Image (cartoon, rainbow, N blue to C red):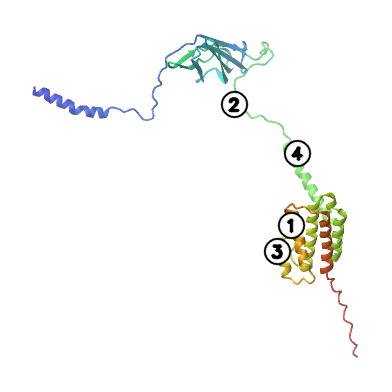
Amino acid sequence: MRRALVLAAVLLVSAPAAWAQAPAPAPGVPKAPVALEPVSPTGASARVEPEEVRIGEPFTYQVTLTHPKDQRYELVAPTGESAVELLQQTRQRQDNANDATTTFGLRFSAFELGSVQLPDLTFDVATPEGPRRFVLKGKAVEVASSLPPDAQGQGAELFDYQPPQEVPIRSWTLLYALAAALAVGLAAWMLVRWWQRRPKRDKVVPLLPLDVRVRQSLDALKREDLPGRGHVKDFYFRLSEIVRGYLGERYGFEALECTSSELMASLRRLPTPGLPEDALMRFVSESDLVKYARADASPESCNQALAFGYDLLARTYVPPAPPKPDAAPGPRVQ
């Protein structure tokens, strides 16, 4: 009795250690896939189009399955090495009165001659009882050569794949590039020589007085009759540039780049005798409304604005003083 109790105690002590040494399943190892129960459609047919398959040319493997309407067949893409390559697959289903027809079109390309076994097709089937699986045995097709029957006698035959090889090709690109570079260099040299030998004619055109230039600009603007042709905005842009350019050159500041407020502030800081400040302010405000606020101006307003330009020139322009004559020589002392 005592020996039995000792043996039982030893077994109880050694059991946890044995359990601890049992290998645990490695993490990340996928579980074995659960085998699905097989199912078969009520009808299955397969055919190859075209019937004569040639190597390298695509052909269609059409599989038609007839099955109950409450089942859905989905093709599992074929995997593994094979003598054919899957290029494309399509699926169409048509429900009839009592059943349904699902048609699969698989576009293959064969790259081996002789009898070639198409891969087995596996279909996942959804049924009311749960997922099932159907496997259709692949069909054997005869792959013929794409060459004519007398090709071997004429010296034409199929060769196996070869690694890339260097093929020398005659090219005139380098010579063309050298010729183009030579032509460009010669043209540049001739242009430099012509530039160095060209006759130099420095003609200095005297600058007309300020009042003459401004009056010519006003006369040209008047002849264009922009308001009469519907270009009121362009008229005010041109007239404003003429007036601002005159004021800037007359009083010595950058008037073309000033805003309206900066223009008036600059004129107030300068001695401007005879300047009609109120009329100028009205002209500037009217010009801004037409140019930037899309305000409309009547032909009378445009004529008054042009008349203001002439009046501003007449009131503010002072002709420059004539140059002083050279001093007369003094009496000669003997």
Mark 2: few/some/many CA within 10 Å (<14, 14-19, 20+)? few
Left or right of 12? Residue 304 is right
Marks 4 and 1, the one that precedes in the sequence: 4
Q: Number of marks in the image?
A: 4
Q: CA separation, marks 3 and 2?
A: 79 Å
Does 151 appear above or below 244? above
- Residue for badge 2: 163
Report if the CB atoms under discs 4 and 1 are less than 8 Å apart.
Answer: no
Marks 4 and 3, the one that precedes in the sequence: 4
Does 76 appear above or below 256? above
- Residue for badge 3: 262
Marks 2 and 4, the one that precedes in the sequence: 2
Report if the CB atoms under discs 2 and 4 are less than 8 Å apart.
Answer: no
At 82% from the left and 62% from the top, the residue drawn is 308
**Dividing the image into 4 quarters, which one contains the N terminus?**
top left
The numbered mark at residue 176 is 4
244 or 147, which lies in front?
A: 244
The numbered mark at residue 288 is 1
The reply to whether residue 210 is in sight is no
Q: What amino acid type is highlighted by mark number 1?
A: Asp
